[in-house]
Image: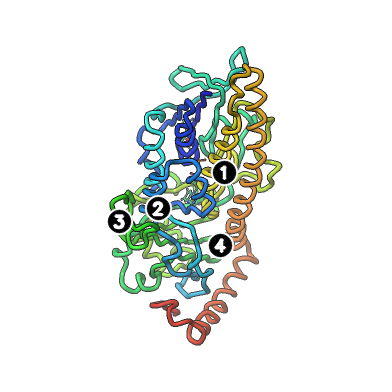
Amino acid sequence: MRVVVVGGGIGGLALGAGLRRRGHRVAVFDRDTDVAATGGYHITLDRRAQSALERSVAPEVVRRLLASASALRLRGRDAFWDRRGRLLGHGPDLADSGSVDVDRITLRTLLADAVGEDLELGREVSGVDRDGHGTPRVAFADGTRVTADLVVGADGAHSVVARHLAAGPTNRPAGIIGFCGRTRRADLGPAERRRLGPRSSTAVAPRGTALYAGFHDPVGNAALDAPELRMSVTTEPTYIWGAMLPESARTDPLRGLIGAGLQAALLSRFRSHGWAESTLEVIARADPASIAAFRFNAASTRAADLAPWSPGRITALGDAVHAVPPTAGMGAGAAIRDAADLLDRLDRLDGAADGGTAALDDALTDAVGRFEAGMRERGSEVLTLGMRPVRWILATDTLIGAAATTVAAPVLAAAASWSGRFGRRPSEGAGEQVQ
Ligand SMILES: Cc1cc2nc3c(=O)[nH]c(=O)nc-3n(C[C@H](O)[C@H](O)[C@H](O)COP(=O)(O)OP(=O)(O)OC[C@H]3O[C@@H](n4cnc5c(N)ncnc54)[C@H](O)[C@@H]3O)c2cc1C
């Protein structure tokens, strides 16, 4: 069986690597010319995503990934702050967490290596259809075409393949514009280094401004102690942050900016919303080249709305079907789980190709139908989780929401201060500053 995968991002490469490992003929096409030219942020993979990877790629690839990943169980509980840097509370204890954070560049590079020469870069797909015999066909921007027994669109939120299948877009803007960047912990002043600490933080303020600072340390907090296998791009403790603003005509000019210009405009926007200078240090001291703006896109949270087409020999997975805002921290994991499920379904097709074209067509259509049913449930789950913080952030941008946030923040800060003084276990919150 020959499978063509459109898109060599996280889901497409996981699928390509798994197909190759199982001996299928596969070709993965991506328009990018360099797999390392991808977002500089990190990806959280929970246990389910890791076990899906274990089913798809060779054990050596998983070992390299874990040796390059930062284990959540080794960092402190997340902290929640207001815009003045007052502590509002903590997230759950992470000691039992099986999740890991890995640089997106590392994850994509590892998966691309596993696909090997079956990955073709610099190949932009312009459309999909079926030829006169009903065989799926992929057309490229350079005018060439290829056919396959099965075509899988793993081409992200603006998917050409899913758009063809759904006869329109599969997601829409979620109302938030995000900015991400990287700041080495060593580049922060001592006070801010102490306040943020070796843990991740979120601060939300009235009028929909929010700032997440994810602590990433694949060397000090390695998930697998095997330095000889390490491929992490991040080599020292780093905050990978995401700033968020409600999207409006006023934020449009930000999306056209890059580097230091974008950094300055972002700082000025947050200052105008009353954020204390200290809480913005993580943005101000970032490497300007690492800062990028992107729009949050989201598909429907309802499973029945996802993949709204009849199953056949052209399908899609990942963000192409269930684009999810990064607030879930689960989009890549869901794409990897989609890939593993499709591989499992295809494994059960053994021998179907020997029964002729009609038998293969029936068997593939059935396998794809079962895969798409599971994908709808997975997509709905991650979208429901990812949209919760989005709705919460957008709610602070209403008159009532802004007032409630303003009133609640000092109360929560005072409560956290009291429980900090009288209720904290000795190991918790070293260096926290409650002003
Ligand atoms: C700042 C940020 C932080 C995130 N954090 C997390 C996290 O912590 N955990 C998590 O699980 N997810 C996270 N995500 C989401 C995650 O990155 C995506 O959900 C995931 O990459 C989706 O995988 P995919 O394979 O479906 O699509 P992608 O990884 O987007 O891959 C799509 C690929 O298709 C290619 N392509 C597109 N169109 C064409 C075409 N016409 N022809 C050829 N190639 C094409 C693109 O070049 C790209 O390589 C984050 C996203 C962002 C922006």
| CB-based contact (under 8 Å), mark 1 and mark 3 | no
Mark 2 vs mark 1: which is more N-terminal? 2
3D distance between C-alphas at marks 2 and 3: 14 Å
The CB of the residue at mark 3 lies under 8 Å from ligand 1:
no
Residue depth check, mark 1 versus mark 3: number of the one nearer the observer = 3
Question: Residue 304 appears at what percent x and percent y?
Answer: 71, 42
3D distance between C-alphas at marks 1 and 3: 30 Å
Amino acid type, residue under disc 1 in the picture: Ala
| CB-based contact (under 8 Å), mark 2 and mark 1 | no
Q: Residue furthest top?
A: 132
Q: Is residue 133 above or below residue 207?
A: above
Q: Is residue 163 visible?
A: no
Residue beneath label 3, please? Answer: 235
Residue at x-position 35% and y-position 70%: 193
3D distance between C-alphas at marks 4 and 3: 36 Å
Amino acid type, residue under disc 2 in the picture: Leu
Instruction: For the C terminus, give its image quadrant.
Output: bottom left
For residue 207, which numbered disc appears in the image?
Answer: 4
Q: Is residue 69 above or below residue 271?
A: above
Residue depth check, mark 2 versus mark 4: number of the one nearer the observer = 2
Mark 1 vs mark 3: which is more N-terminal? 3
Mark 4 vs mark 1: which is more N-terminal? 4
Amino acid type, residue under disc 3 in the picture: Thr
Tag 3 secondary structure: loop
Amino acid type, residue under disc 4 in the picture: Arg
Question: Residue 250 appears at what percent x and percent y?
Answer: 51, 51
The quarter of the picture where residue 76 lies is bottom left
The CB of the residue at mark 1 lies under 8 Å from ligand 1:
yes
For residue 66, which numbered disc appears in the image?
Answer: 2
| CB-based contact (under 8 Å), mark 2 and mark 3 | no
Residue beneath label 1, please? Answer: 323
